[in-house]
Image: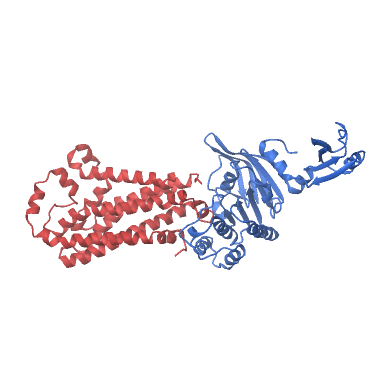
Amino acid sequence: MLRSVFAKTLRDSERGILWWSLGLAGLAAMMVAVYPSVRDNPGLDQLLESYPEALKGIIGFGGELDYSSGAGYLGIELFSFMVPLLLIVAGVAAGAGAVAGEEERGTLDLLLSTPVSRRRLVLEKLGALVVEVVVLGAVLWVALVIGSNASDLGVSAANLGATTASAVLLALGFGTIALWVGAATGRRGRAIAVAAAAAVATYFVNSLASLSRVLDALQPTSPFYHYSAGDPLRHGLGATHAAFLVALVLGAAVLAVVAVERRDFRT
Amino acid sequence: MIRAEGLTKMYGRHTGVRELTFEVAPGEVFGFLGPNGAGKTTTIRLMLDLIRPTAGRLEVFGLDVRAESVAIRRRLGYVPGDLRLYDRLTARELLQFLAHLRGVRDLRDAEELAGRLGLELDRPIHALSKGNRQKAGLVQAFMHRPELLVLDEPTAGLDPLVQQVFYDLIREAAAEGRVVFLSSHVLSEVQHVANRVGVIREGSLVLVDEIEALRERAATRVEATFAEPPPPGAFADVQGVTEVERRGPTVVFSLRGPADPLVKALARYRVLALDSHEADLEDIFVGLYRGEDAA
């Protein structure tokens, strides 16, 4: 488990991954278990219709708003907010600590006295970040597939996978931004602050787009838009939306490599 | 082995090091001395490519530290001045990890070194004392038998017995033709193992010389106690001798070169006691640190 920076980083976050997995699986199981009683309550759909547009934007997830289908229910209850929030928090924490954590703890001097190039350091840390978030997504997916069968949600395993994958890509986008800022500044706090600010701002751009023409024009720049706009719970992963999120990850990764190549590390 | 030419590192307006020019030859143990904050760690971190020079050149193994850092790092061992280890690993795991990164599979050398230094390998690093962490730092620097050892204040926290083992390691490395770049803020830590020393003060090299040459240049202190104090100026013309201090009947001389002229001059008076001290290099260094010229 200590064969590379990649492997060691994953080993360091083993315990964190375990707890996050339990939390995500527990959340999914709880939400799915409640579904049958929600579905059989037609009053909820009427309530939804009476919501103002802004609120619909916030609680909505891509397609139609309803509580009477499994896809509608999961969109509102899990994928519009809780799942992306949790995965982004996990991704940003891992990304911010990737390079800046080593620098702040002072272990970077020792690590970079070995024949590991700065670029390889960033790429192996990114690799560990990707694996960590993908594992969390996979755990969530498995929990949802099992729960969906048990509670008869009527969402295919493929569409659950596509939606989870979309959330994973979203979280990796902000996680990689945190990695970049951490690699460029050596400060974990700053990395978390910048990535969190970007997430909050783009979240509101997407969910409040119906309120203003400016926000509406900006909406396609929001990663949250591409995360949900294709309605992956019903239609699977849209290629262009997924490509946008992948490009975000790759772009931030390139910036991280460029930034780390040109700086002085602090003691 | 190491060649610096006009090496300069600025931090904004603050000078890290200024126009360092020096060379370390194969087989040398080079002592790099200076008070804390003089630029020792800055120089060393430039060699490791952890920071980048503002101006000048720095080559290790004839390779540019910036362009070929990975190739250089493959061949060196390093103990950072502010040594921080992965606290959650055991010392053995730390060594395994670093060995893997260096492409070393065989940990027998590491285990032998740990045994000699008295490092317990299977305790987590956060449970180790400062001295034991430093031992782990030394083991990882020496374990792959690198061609160059860059050691930044490596004896910090080591007890005297372990320091002796450390000096043995340095001597063995030198005997095998490996180069040691050893920084310290006190001369006594390097004078028994170094062939040459460089002294840095406020970012500039103020002296680079062989230890032997320094010793020859250094003055011997001679203390003579007389039955009656000789008249002032009695030794003014004696070759190689300066009168440093008088305490009643005791006169302290500083002697450079052969002792004969002083002995002959003393013989003109009744001498009750005579005491002389080995050339004290530390005095020279304290002088250099303060900014005085080398004696």
Position in image of residue A70 (x %, y %): 15, 60
Q: Is residue A235 left or right of residue B152?
A: left
Task: Tell me, yes or no, if residue B62 can be seen here.
Answer: yes
Q: Residue at x 48, y 44 (%)?
A: A263
User: Relative to the observer, which residue lies in front, B4 or B241?
Assistant: B241
Q: Is residue B249 above or below residue A19?
A: above
Position in image of residue B181 (x %, y %): 64, 51
- Give the red chain's letter: A
- Which hue is chain B drawn in? blue
Task: Tell me, yes or no, if residue A247 can be seen here.
Answer: no
Q: Residue at x 46, y 63 (%)?
A: A2
Position in image of residue B286 (x %, y %): 69, 40
Q: Residue furthest top?
A: B232
Name the image quarter holding residue B237: top right
Q: Residue at x 81, y 45 (%)?
A: B276
Which image quadrant: the C terminus of chain B? top right
